[in-house]
Amino acid sequence: MKPTGPIPPDFTWRDGELLIGGRTADDWIGITGDTPLFVYDIAIVRNRVARFRAAFPGISLHYAVKANPHPPLVRAMTALVDGLDVASEGEARVALAAGADPGRISFAGPGKRDRELSAAIEAGITINLESAGEAERALAIGRGLGRTPRLAVRLNPDFELKGSGMKMGGGAKPFGIDADQAVPVIRRIIGEGADYRGLHIFAGSQALDAAAISEAQISAIALAARISEQAAALPPRVNLGGGMGIRYFASDPPLDERRIGEALADALSVRPDILSGTEFTIELGRWLVGEAGVYLSRIVDRKISHGETFLVVDGGLHHQLAASGNFGTVVRRNYPISLTKIGRSTKLMLVSVVGCLCTPLDRLGDHVELPDAQVGDAVALFLAGAYGASASPQSFLGHPPPMEITIDGTEIL
């Protein structure tokens, strides 16, 4: 048997049936009519936002839309957070359609095309510049449109977030402008009359070490102050990035956000004068929505091969690439997984839950213990709220896309 990650504590059971929001998982399947199905519970997200507010008073909260761009979810998020961060023109359209204030949307990512820069400038979205060349293109496009672009500088810091799942700063990176090259770019965009919106410093993501996250945030504050003093430019906002992770696997420790908030408050209480009027922002994606999602699929076959039992479901890695272990994981480990109904029997079976794709990579549960399951039973894969449907190869082998719903209590938003 191989261990599975912990089921998030927000989910409960009633008479042996999994509850999601105010209904059973099978109720949601019945309402939508089929599987595979993603269900995102906004009540869980609301709880995460409340935890953030308690741990980080005075810090603004942005939602990273790339974590989950499901439009009803983004609409709900717009009312809960202080801004949205997007990484493409498509995500920007989702954010604007959700009613987000363009002045509270920022657009990051390398390789922005001219039409994307133009659309952002026309909408009044802040562009986080990733290079000196991108700065020149944005300035030229702004002049051509007769619009003043809102521009921030994304820094590639001279440090990284230790223990992060994805390191996005330190050393040679496609993201951001190297710290030692940033001052001329800041002076250039201010000198050209652009609306300078500050700095963006994103060192890494999916970290579970509170001390490492705090160290990176403190380093980011020091870097922001140094660059701002050298450029003689007060930054209206400093986006400290995210980094806060969630527990996917059995060996993952819980993250104490209160420790991070306390260390950040201490650091800001003695920040240099040039940052005295700066708004500080933390940009979070998976920490807000990852635990709020469940992926539901139906067992369509049960077979035994060389003594091993396989439960074949109608979903798979084309919807949940990360859970299959094929999205940056070095050693494959099991996400939390369960049947949606647990009968009175306590008998457990050692099984592997595999998807419907014709590839050995399509495995959602590897040698896990589940109650005795039959064809027609539904399987719940947890931690499906972030980097699920939109981060998976949905077109692979021509299977249909999954359904997605965002719920609040017993209602679909």
Image: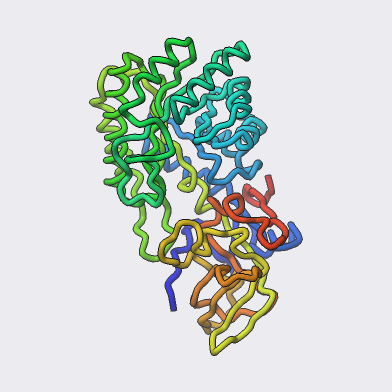
Point out the residue furthest to the right here.
33
Which corner quadrant of the image does residue 98 belong to? top right
- 405 sits to left or right of 182: right
Residue at 55% across, 79% down: 371
* Rendering coords of residue 126 (x, y %): 52, 24
Q: How many marks?
A: 0
- Residue 103 lies, with reference to residue 110, above or below; the image says above
- Residue 304 lies, with reference to residue 402, above or below; the image says below
- 31 sits to left or right of 52: right
- Residue 399 lies, with reference to residue 177, above or below; the image says below
The colour scheme used here is: rainbow
Which corner quadrant of the image does residue 173 belong to? top left
Residue at 27% across, 24% down: 226
**Viewport quadrant of the C terminus:** top right
* Rendering coords of residue 232 (x, y %): 31, 14
* Rendering coords of residue 378 (x, y %): 64, 70
Instruction: State whether residue 300 appears in this view.
Output: yes
**Viewport quadrant of the N terminus:** bottom left
- Residue 58 lies, with reference to residue 10, above or below; the image says above
Q: Nearer the viewer, residue 397 or 355?
A: 397
* Rendering coords of residue 92 (x, y %): 61, 33
Instruction: State whether residue 57 appears in this view.
Output: no
- 205 sits to left or right of 321: left
Point out the residue furthest to the left here.
270
Residue at 72% across, 60% down: 398
Q: Nearer the viewer, residue 32 or 15?
A: 32
Residue at 37% across, 34% down: 156
Q: Nearer the viewer, residue 346 or 62?
A: 62
